């Protein structure tokens, strides 16, 4: 079973594992990540093995600073502006790879682009000490609910990894927002921990949406973030035996007969809702209910990312992977 160490005492142990080509679960400001040296094929392969992740799904490479980022990718002016505005933080940029950057091909799933992010806190410190970028998808079994606590990581992956670094509950609670420059415009590939409106304000233009050509970045599979229970969205009523995931102060009809009930935010605060989303989905899934009904969540601000995760969690699960 994985050892759990606090972030204050785990740095040297984590470095030793990463240098040996192993993986470590680490806290970030978004969700917990399963980290491996992005230049080490054995370490990267262990990420896929531990998660049961399909090889066609690329990983985000995490960097310590702009100098490291520019050794890995070619920055256009628009992407550079966003990096300076939002890094370190929950923004991922998809960029052309710099030739000879040393990133193992498994990280990019054969694409000529690379997804880069600069995390805050323990992750950034770890990368700086290692001196190499870390590939770090969410620390959970592939397609399942992302972990926002060390305990959730250990319950899922504890038998498959050696170390979980405990940094407490993650403050953002949603994965990073992913964008990609297309000429003089930016396309939103995945809504996340930075609201699209914040990015649009920083660049002075609207983000393009839709039209992505296949899987260009992590988190783009139709079915993802899924609990064991079925999910029913925009519920106005609660069926017998269903669990209920609420939002705000107005309840779905029949909510008192729910098998279990949690409210993402009684005050209707989307930031609070985002930070609670995955942990509450996990708790309701453990209630034994076969279906989790979800009250409507508005689409503005972080609501776009919350609804993205809910829709992927509710998607059909019998055909979630493209034919190789």
Image (cartoon, rainbow, N blue to C red):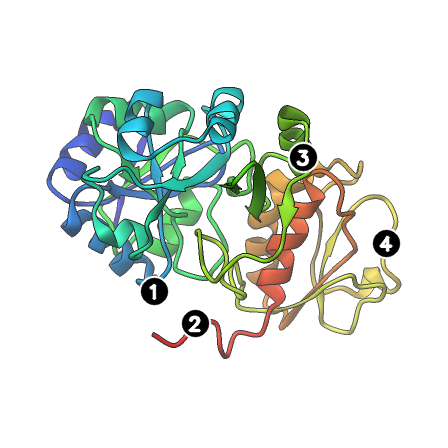
> Where does label 1 land, which residue?
54
Mark with earlier residue (1, 3):
1
| Residue 292 drawn at (x, y percent) | 67, 65
Question: Which of marks 4 and 1 precedes in the sequence?
Answer: 1
Callout in the foreground (2, 4): 2
Nearest the eye: 11 or 289 = 11
Q: Could one spot residue 65 in this view of the protein? A: no
Residue found at x 25% / y 54%: 106
170 w.r.t. 125: above or below: below
Q: Quadrant of residue 18?
A: top left
Q: Which mark is residue 163?
A: none
Q: CA distance from mark 1 to mark 4?
A: 39 Å
From the image, tell me which residue sits under label 3: 271
Element under disc 2: loop
* Nearest to N terminus: mark 3 or mark 4: 4
Residue tagged by mark 2? 321
User: Considering only order in the chain, which callout, 4 or 2, is on the residue closer to the N terminus?
Assistant: 4
Q: Which residue is mark 4?
A: 251
Whether residue 25 sits left or right of residue 131 in the image: it is right
Q: Tell me whether the residue at label 1 lies in contact with that at label 4, contact meaning CB atoms closer than 8 angstroms.
A: no
Comparing marks 3 and 4, which lies closer to the viewer? Answer: 3
Q: Is residue 119 left or right of residue 40?
A: right
Cα distance, mark 1 to mark 3? 31 Å
Disc 3 vs disc 2: which is toward the camera? 2
Q: Nearer the viewer, residue 291 or 315?
A: 315
Mark 1 and mark 3 residues within 8 Å of each other at the beta carbon: no
| Secondary structure state at the residue bearing disc 4 | loop
């Amino acid at each position: 079973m994985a050892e759990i160490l606090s972030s204050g005492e785990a740095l040297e142990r984590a470095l030793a594992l990463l240098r040996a080509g192993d993986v470590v679960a680490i806290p970030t400001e978004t969700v917990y990540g399963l980290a491996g040296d992005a230049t080490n094929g054995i370490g990267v392969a262990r990420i896929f093995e531990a998660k049961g992740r399909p090889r066609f799904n690329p990983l985000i490479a995490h960097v310590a600073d702009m100098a490291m980022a520019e050794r890995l990718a070619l920055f256009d002016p628009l992407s550079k502006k966003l990096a300076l505005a939002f890094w370190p933080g929950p923004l991922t940029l998809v960029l052309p790879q710099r030739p000879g950057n040393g990133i193992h091909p498994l990280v990019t799933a054969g694409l000529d682009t690379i997804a880069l992010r600069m995390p805050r806190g323990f992750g950034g410190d770890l990368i700086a000490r290692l001196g190499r970028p870390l590939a770090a998808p969410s620390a959970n079994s592939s397609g399942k609910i992302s972990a926002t606590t060390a305990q959730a990581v250990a319950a899922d992956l504890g038998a498959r990894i050696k170390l979980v670094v405990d940094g407490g509950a993650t403050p953002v609670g949603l994965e990073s927002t992913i964008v990609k420059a297309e000429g003089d415009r930016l396309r939103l590939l995945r809504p996340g921990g930075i609201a699209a409106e914040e990015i649009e304000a920083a660049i002075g233009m609207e983000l393009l949406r839709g039209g992505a050509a296949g899987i260009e970045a992590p988190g783009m599979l139709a079915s993802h973030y899924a609990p064991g229970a079925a999910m029913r969205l925009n519920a106005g009523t609660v069926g017998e035996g269903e669990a209920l995931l609420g939002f705000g102060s107005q309840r779905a009809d029949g909510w008192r007969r729910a098998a279990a009930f949690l409210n993402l935010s009684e005050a209707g605060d989307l930031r609070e809702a985002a930070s609670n989303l995955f942990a509450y989905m996990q708790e309701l899934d453990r209630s034994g209910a076969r279906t989790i009904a979800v009250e409507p969540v508005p689409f503005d601000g972080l609501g776009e990312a919350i609804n993205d995760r809910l829709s992927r969690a509710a998607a059909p699960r019998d055909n979630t992977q493209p034919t190789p």
